[in-house]
Image: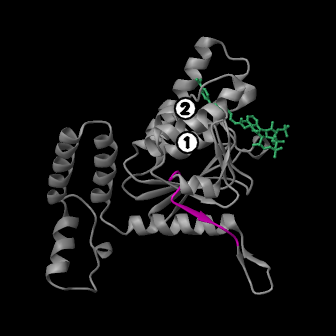
Amino acid sequence: MEFITYEQEGFVGVITINRPKALNALNSQVLDELNEVLDTVDVGKTRAIVLTGAGEKSFVAGADIGEMSTLTKAEGEAFGKKGNDVFRKLETLPVPVIAAVNGFALGGGCEISMSCDIRLCSDNAIFGQPEVGLGITPGFGGTQRLARLVSPGMAKQLIYTARNIKADEAYRIGLVNAVYSATLDEAGNVTATAQENLLAAAKKMAAGIAANAPIAVRNCKKAINDGLQTDIDQAIVIEEKLFGDCFETEDQRAGMGNFLEKDKEKKLKVVPFKNK
Ligand code: DAK
């Protein structure tokens, strides 16, 4: 692949979008490669994924404006579908995905981060949906996911004004869960950059998720995602079913057994993670 790298670090997969010439903007090839890499993730061996962009300046600077500029109506719809299909695949992947947002997350960049389960960012991150300034609407789910993630009023403000926001404001409105800065020594020298701290934190969080029962984590993701699409009565039924399914796993027996035996040494992470 030319623009996507995938590394497996234990139970954690790291996907990096690497198209430095265009600040990691999403063209058709990047979307195709992302689609392919998501298809090859071994969800038996991978319990959490970190998605990031290469370089310190940009996570993803949007959909590729050059490629979009000449699209016809039909081609525009096809491009939108290509992106939406990949983003939906990411959103419904059976393992949690953490977006480590390093720098610009504009348009499609903000949208891909919103398809992930959790967003962390470096203090130079800039979020925004600049599409109306380009004469288009957000086309990779931005109108839908931003309104669900923050509030309809705040989403409308950001989308209608096309105003970019910095990391601290993204944190304030709940778009990101945490912001990471560089670490300095006493003399003021940088000992770890914001991006290094961000990636370390994202991988640590992913490893923490990976240490829990994977089927239970997977079921939680499905319960939250599916439940949010429906009314509370149906949502509770979705949860009941997925909760019940956990009682057919070794993890549930071992996890509760360890607690009842007061066996603190035998943490859940050392038991085999699989269905009965
Ligand atoms: N597309 C293509 N190239 C891009 C790009 C992008 N989105 N963003 C940056 N680049 C390229 C620049 O053209 C430049 O290339 P060269 O000139 O060096 O060849 C290189 O990356 C470095 O960028 P700059 O020189 O501009 O760097 P600066 O530091 O000065 O500025 C910036 C960084 C991120 C503020 C600026 O590059 C910028 O404003 N970029 C565009 C950001 C943007 O507007 N992104 C949103 C795109 S709209 C739909 C489907 C999808 C979408 C909508 C509808 N349907 C089919 C319905 C999605 C829309 C979007 O994402």
From the viewer's side, name the closer residue of 122 and 252.
122
Residue 51 horizontal/vertical position (percent) = 56, 52
Earlier residue among tags 1 and 2: 1
Q: Residue at x 36, y 55 (%)?
A: 44
**Does residue 177 show up magenta in the picture?**
yes
Residue 91 horizontal/vertical position (percent) = 43, 43
Q: Is residue 113 left or right of residue 181?
A: left
Q: Is residue 109 left or right of residue 86?
A: right
Say which quarter of the image contains residue 202. bottom right
Residue identifier under label 2: 140
The amino acid marked with disc number 2 is Phe
Q: Is residue 172 above or below residue 255?
A: above
From the viewer's side, name the closer residue of 114 and 4.
114
Q: Is residue 33 left or right of residue 41?
A: right
Residue 270 horizontal/vertical position (percent) = 31, 75
Say which quarter of the image contains residue 140. top right
Q: Main secondary structure of the magenta part?
A: loop
**Mark 2 lies within 8 Å of ligand 1 (Cβ measured):** yes
Residue identifier under label 1: 112
